Amino acid sequence: MELLFFNPDEYERLYNCSAYEIDQVPLSKRQNIKLGFIFLSIGIICEVLYVPCMIAIRKHMDSTCFKFMFYIAIADMLCLLVCGIVTGYLAIIGAVFCTAPTFIYISGAFALALWVTETTAEMFLAFNRCVELSSSRLADLLFGGKRIYLWMVVTTLYGMYFVLFTKPLIFNGIYITWFQNPHVGYIDSFEDTYRNSMQSIHNVIVVAVLPSIYLLFALILFVKGRKISAAAGPNASLVNQKSIFIQVVLISCVNAIASAIYVSMNLVPLSKLLILVGHFCWIMAHGIPPIIYLLLNKTVRHDVLVMFVRPIGMVFPFITLPSGGKTSIIRTLETNRVTVTNTSKSIHIIMLQTNRVKPLATIEPSHHHQSANANELLKVYFDPPEVQYLVTVSKVIDFDEGTYRIIANGLRTKTQPDGREMIKLNKTILADFEYISFIFVRSDGLKALGVVSGDEAREEKELAFDYYENGG
């Protein structure tokens, strides 16, 4: 952008259109209505899918992971406007750089900056996930509190450097993609005149670093999963482990393939098919996250489902969220009285470890209510990965992103004169944690919130919970 606004002579030397006529390449060879419509449609569909996902992600912004996801979502949606929607439109009309030089120049500058921003944030997110799995203390040191925003500021400044001080990508309708050379198809040159070395270096880093970090993430997750399986028994489910691995592999592979092809096509001639594959991967690098979230991320999928089903259910009462369809026994939070209900969402206990991942655990009624054993009244589902324990409503579970332990063998409640409900943690604390916050959600939407430190829990201190209205 500096050439366009601050160095017009150099801009005119590099990007003027006086050396050839646009029609030297016939419109029939520059125009591709079918592919343009496909790219345009993919861009619009992915933008639409991203909207409810962003709303769902926004609800969990107390987690560093979801903060990164929300930041990446903003970059993705902005970049999809160019690499999907604008590209599709330009392909339909058969545009090349000289068709609309200023518009294409500015669009390419922002597209490159957003690509760099998104892939850098992806690498930081991958690093964050590895640190979170390995050490909660180190994760808090690097990403805790407002420090998470420093990573985003660095990423944003890095992207701004590209938009201001490096050569942009330029659309070319002959190949239906974006090149560094604005005159591809008219003046083909692979010399250094238009080469953006910073872009090439960045893409090489993405190809090397992103898969490596996610491979490390998968390895750590595998090791944690083995420990969970050993603790939970041979029947412990590994479904969510596979789900997480698939999510990270899909996202990292699409980014890496797009980076590799774009590095290659600005250095040596590639076939038109391979160039189109590269551009499709670029679109999907920004467009595939909402698809992955809706298919594989239980938290986002559930929130999006609730978002759409609840309004419809108000008009058509027979449409409800899936509940298992069986009568279950639960203990109500306010009286601890055994109650029969036909819904699986009458009581949920969601536990957070100091602004980490949310939700950490959800306790739902078990369908084995005929059993005389009180420990079979409730099932606990962990995400990720899914491991099932049968516990009472008074059990507490510690979550350390891959390590799950029962940290208290029971909670005793008593009502105080001021109406607050006191929760007393038993002394059998097995987990090593600094702070744990608890959110109890009743069937009527009323919530109780409290925070206790690890030392207080080990010393058997009492923890006060104050009820507050939903959303308060």
Image (cartoon, helix red, strand yellow):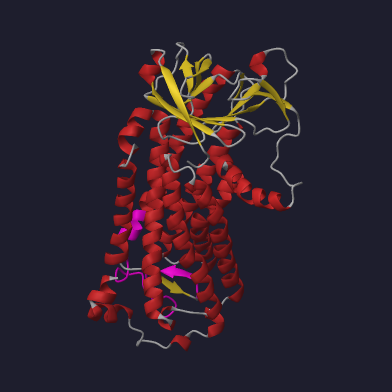
Relative image position of residue 8 (x, y in whole percent): 25, 79
Query: In terms of depth relative to the viewer, which is nearer, 80 or 439?
Result: 439
The answer to whether residue 368 is left or right of residue 351 is: right
Q: Quadrant of residue 297?
A: top right
- Extreme-front residue of the structure: 417
Relative image position of residue 22 (x, y in whole percent): 45, 86
Query: In terms of depth relative to the viewer, which is nearer, 294 or 214?
Result: 294
The answer to whether residue 324 is left or right of residue 181 is: right
Query: In terms of depth relative to the viewer, which is nearer, 169 or 288?
Result: 288
- The relative height of residue 203 versus residue 341 in the rendered view (above or below) is below
Q: Main secondary structure of the magenta part?
A: loop
Relative image position of residue 294 (x, y in whole percent): 59, 48
User: Looking at the figure, which quarter contains the N terminus?
Assistant: bottom left
Does residue 176 appear anywhere in the picture? no
The segment highlighted magenta reads 174-202
Q: Quadrant of residue 165?
A: bottom left
Query: In terms of depth relative to the viewer, which is nearer, 418 or 116?
Result: 418
Does residue 84 appear anywhere in the picture? yes
Q: Residue at the spot x=48%, y=79% of the render?
A: 95
Q: Residue at the spot x=42%, y=45% of the render?
A: 67
Q: Within the magenta stretch, is there residue 451?
A: no
- The relative height of residue 367 versus residue 82 in the rendered view (above or below) is above
Count of all numbered marks drawn on residues in the image: 0
Relative image position of residue 296 (x, y in whole percent): 59, 43
